Image (cartoon, grey):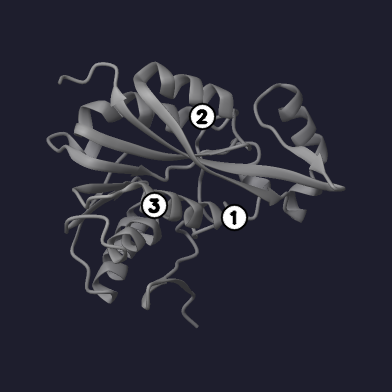
Amino acid sequence: MVEECIYETDNKSLSIILSKNVFKPTGTSRELIKATVNNIEKPGKLLDLGCGSGFVGLALYLNGKLIPPLYASDLNEDSVNLLKKNALRNNFKCIVNKGSIFDPWQNEKFDYIVNDISGISDEIAPISPWFKETSCMAGKDGTELVVKALEKSPQYLNNGGKFFFPVLSFSNANKIISFAKSIYSKVELLSHKEWIVPDELKKNMEILKSLKLSGYIDYKEKFGLMIWYTDIYVAYKPLNETI
């Protein structure tokens, strides 16, 4: 049986197929879609960075938040091929390239960049329910890839462009936000969503406690539950942007 993921809005439906070796959409994926949809007033040229199955980018396409085609890339060749299949399945126009972060887009600029590259601690990824068949490579504090994307992003944005990115508390969230503010004059929190820590992680409490004590991740106890969170941010007006 083919595994599918469904996204619905305004009487429209998006159906994508999934693959065991391609990152599967999560609650964070849906939060990123919702926050981005609510913050884009005028459709423009959009890049889905770390596209995976294409769930985020194709959902934004469905919502009319980009001028076709959708631009997308991922380091994983299986992700690139899967997105192409999902775009064809939904009759969406896409340009999809394989490569690390912005390497495939050397001569391009975008109105919107939506970053969905891995952003949790490398020590949490293999014991979590999210990276069973896929890699993470975000470093012990989960910031490595997000920081690289933030650092390079201004040169790939048109003037007035926006960079959307999730920050998970299973990374060093403060480090990511501080770095974003060193690159952009405007860094705004769009949404905050709390989640219950999965059972798979509760079985590895010593790892979680050690990472939290070192400042690499954060979580809290609330109403007898262990809670982590996803924040969605938008960054714009790079400090080096020409007017």
At which x and y percent is residue 238?
Answer: 29, 22
Residues at marks 3 and 1 touching, judged by CB atoms closer than 8 Å:
no
At which x and y percent is residue 148?
Answer: 38, 27
Does residue 199 appear in this view?
A: yes
For discs 3 and 1, the disc positioned in front in the rendered view: 3
| Rendered position, 136 above or below 83 | above
Q: Nearer the viewer, residue 205 or 69?
A: 69
Q: Is residue 210 left or right of residue 126?
A: right
- Secondary structure beneath dot 3 equals helix
Q: Which mark is residue 132?
A: 1
Residue that numbered label 2 is attached to: 143
Q: CA distance from mark 1 to mark 2?
A: 20 Å
Bin the neighbour count of mark 2 within 10 Å (Cα to Cα): few under 14, some 14-19, many 20 and up. many
Residue that numbered label 3 is attached to: 38
Q: Residue at x 45, y 58 (%)?
A: 22
Q: Earlier in the sequence, mark 3 or mark 1?
A: 3
At which x and y percent is residue 12?
Answer: 35, 76
Q: Residue at x 63, y 46 (%)?
A: 126
Q: Residue at x 28, y 74 (%)?
A: 90
Three-letter amino acid code of the residue under disc 3: Asn
Q: Earlier in the sequence, mark 1 or mark 2?
A: 1
For discs 1 and 2, the disc positioned in front in the rendered view: 2
Residues at marks 1 and 2 touching, judged by CB atoms closer than 8 Å:
no
- Secondary structure beneath dot 2 equals loop
Q: Nearer the viewer, residue 174 or 223?
A: 223
Bin the neighbour count of mark 3 within 10 Å (Cα to Cα): few under 14, some 14-19, many 20 and up. few
Does residue 101 appear in this view?
A: no
| Rendered position, 63 above or below 12 | above
Q: Is residue 124 left or right of residue 202?
A: left
